[in-house]
Image (cartoon, rainbow, N blue to C red):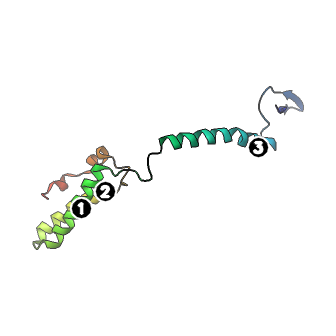
Amino acid sequence: MAKAGYVEEWKYHNTYSGTPQGGIVSPILANIYLHELDCYVEALIADFTKGEVRSVNREWKKISSKASRLNKDIKQEVDQEARSKLLEHKKDLLRLKGCTKTTFDPLRAASNLTAKASCAR
């Protein structure tokens, strides 16, 4: 093991473990030690990897299909008041859909949903 110590008030004190801070050997020893950790983590990743693409969250898919249907309804709607309600509902859905496909949290989404979003499909 490398000899390490420290100097305090011009007096050398011996330490029993470690490497000196700022020493040339310190980063090399850290890399040697962390190499084993890297190998271990890579093996864990290989054990837990199940595929190339994660599955799409069902709740996100529901909201995405509702938003698509709303687009169609908005284009077909003639009445301006009904159209504005549909647009408000779409804005609320898009606010929910802001999460990614795989990290969608339905509980957080439900708390973001406002009373305005209760209009009919």
Q: Which mark is residue 40?
A: none
Residue plotted at (73% across, 40% down): 32
| Residue identifier under label 2 | 97
Q: Is residue 21 left or right of residue 52?
A: right
Answer above or below: position of 50 versus 69.
Answer: above
Upstream in sequence: badge 3 or badge 2: 3
Q: For numbered disc 3, what is the local secondary structure?
A: helix
Asked whether disc 1 touches disc 3, contact meaning CB atoms under 8 Å apart, the reply is no
Of the residues shown, which amino acid type is indicated by label 2?
Answer: Lys
Of the two numbered discs 2 and 1 on the same chain, state the one appearing first in sequence: 1
Q: Is the C-beta separation of discs 2 and 1 under 8 Å?
A: yes
Q: Position of residue 12 (x, y in %)?
A: 88, 30
Does 32 sit above or below residue 83? Answer: above
Secondary element under disc 2, as helix, strand or loop, is helix
Residue 28: mark: 3
Tell me the quarter of the image containing the N terminus. Answer: top right
Closest to the observer: 12 or 42? 42
Image-based side of 40 in relation to 80, left or right: right
